[in-house]
Amino acid sequence: MGFKIENLYFLVVLFFLSACFGPKKVRSGEEAFEFKQYSVGIPLFLDEFEESNNQSEKAKISFLLGESYRLMGQFSKSISWYKKSYDLGYGFSALEKYAFALKSNEDYEDAIRNFILLAEESGLASVYRKEINICKLAIDWKKRGLSSNEFKVDQWLDVNEKGAHDFGTQFHPDGSLYFSSDRFGAKGSEKYAWSGHFYFDIYQYSPIEKKLIAVNDDINTIHHEGSVAFDKTGENIYFVRCEPRELEDSYCDIFKYNLKQNGETEMIFLGEELCNNVHPALHPSDTILVFSSDRKLGEGMYDLYYSVFRNGEWTNPINLGAGINTTGNEKFPVWNKDTLYFSSDQLAGMGGLDIFKTWIQPSGQWVSPQRLPYPINSGADDYSISFDPLFLKNDHTLNSGVFCSNRIQQDGDKIFRFYEMKPKKDTIQKPVSKGKIYVYLNVLFYAKESYYQPNSDIRLDSVYTILLEDSSLLFSENKQFIIREVEMGKAYSFRFSRKGYWPLELEYEIPAFNFSPTKDSTVTLAWPVRLIPVEFDKAFVLEDVFFDFDKWDLRNEAEKSLLSMIRFLKSNPNLKIKIQ
């Protein structure tokens, strides 16, 4: 008996199982099931069920029908066939699948009753007691989510196509949305026997023009493509392609393509092991790649790994560890600044894949994954969250983005928009005639060339900027970022740091502007930052320190240089220096 939760629907299993077979001629439902041709097998199973007079045989057919519908994303249909299989005497396996199917359908009360029955029949009460408690929590999570109105969710009808599976969303830095779909018009003309749909291609959607934009033919092939990520500039796209690697077996790998140069696709080498490497997530530094893989010696079925770009190549992947990975599946990682979002079907969630977030503490340890609330998460598979890079926070909405879910089970995986709403108690009612001033900070780092390896275009570690008032981390390089909730006339302290440079703390004051706009306005400020490389036993010359002849006191011109030295020493209190 196995007790791993396997609430993976059509999308997840379809795109990323470790041995996807090509089409084969089959003569029975069971043979079609063996070769993962579920769309072919279902009508065969239905005929075989009607023709059979053997109860044991009908029980097995019912179970395999339930599995086929589940793996095709028609989850509500799988529930009735699991129940029929159990009633016909198929036993423990059918009951277990039935209970988890009810949980993922958000029928938590019925799921609890069947988990209690499982605990009695299996003799493993502790295993199912956990699921009973999670179902009780899920009931409370759903109630709180419905009452709090923290998030608003709706299906993005302009992007989704009825009858197709749309998934793997990721915003490009320019605000356009990339996703994968098996809709009509895909590059490959053949249909996939697993689903009865076309193979997945990558599409681009412009929210401004409200239309699909053609993606370069070098990216899409007759095979599956999907789950994209972009570098900081948006020039390079990382995506997954699943194609035959040996004999008839297909495996999924991560590829890179330059959208501007339109060259050839480049496979990212992530070790010799024969496995699936999927769902790339590129850190804003462009030097850390997190992805999901089913390689050996992991914590579970699919784990999250990371690789670092060093000396022109990606290092051997390292498992993120048991604090993140479970015995189940961890998939669809996405970076938003320095927060890592991902989906798991084994961490305590509402059913199927739930979206969690984590980040690295100063100690180097990952924070325990935090589940996103309902209705972002549901009983179904929820994954591929992506934040709109062009969204500007206002008095009512704090954030906006998209994610994917198969919660509308009759129509497969779909793209949903979400809006994170500002709590009502914090909402300030302002006269319609007044606008809000936003400050857009353009932080200018000196010696830009020092952020690259000598005589190369390989960028080193990023510069990190911390707002000391609330310890919030604001990623920056030599580009702009927006400071949130600043007040006019107030001073803010920042800490800038990067590997190989002395950290520096600076205080900047937001000017008090003497105007009252009638609509929201943005004021741009340019602030310079100079980071000093770490070099020991080196003499530093204090420039622009002037005295008048035969005087001991400093001239006013020296103040700027001395204040700069004071800030540097305060930022590095443990630094020992020798004055000569």
Image: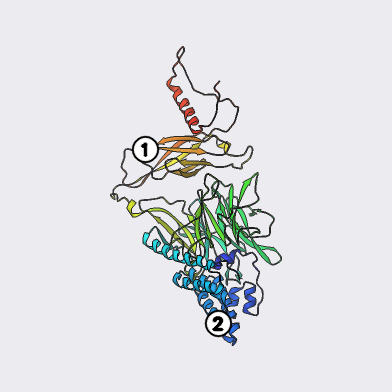
Q: Earlier in the sequence, mark 1 or mark 2?
A: 2
Disc on res. 88: 2
Q: Secondary structure at mark 1?
A: loop
Judge depth for marks 1 and 2 and give the one in front: 2
Q: Nearer the viewer, residue 534 or 395?
A: 534
Q: Position of residue 571 (x, y in %)?
A: 49, 33
Place of residue 482 in the rendered image (x, y in percent of width and height, measured from the top left):
44, 44
Q: Which mark is residue 490?
A: 1
In the displayed structure, 203 sits above or below 236; it is below
Quadrant location, the N terminus: bottom right
Instruction: Describe residue 204's horizontal placement relative to residue 36 as left or right.
Output: left
Splitting the image into 4 quarters, where does residue 456 fall? top right
Q: Residue at x 49, y 22 (%)?
A: 544
Residue 145 percent location from the top left of the image: 40, 61
How far apart in space, not on screen, are marks 1 and 2 (Cα)?
A: 72 Å
Q: Residue at the location (44% across, 66% down)?
A: 136
Residue type for callout 1 = Lys
Q: What residue do we see at 52% from left, 24% from top?
A: 542
- Residue 486 horizontal side relative to residue 473, left or right: left
The crowd level at tag 1 (other Cα within 10 Å; few <14, some 14-19, many 20+) is: few
Give the left or right position of residue 562, taking residue 41 as reference.
Answer: left
Residue 274 picture location, percent across and down: 68, 60
Q: Is residue 182 visible?
A: no
Q: Residue at x 47, y 69 (%)?
A: 408
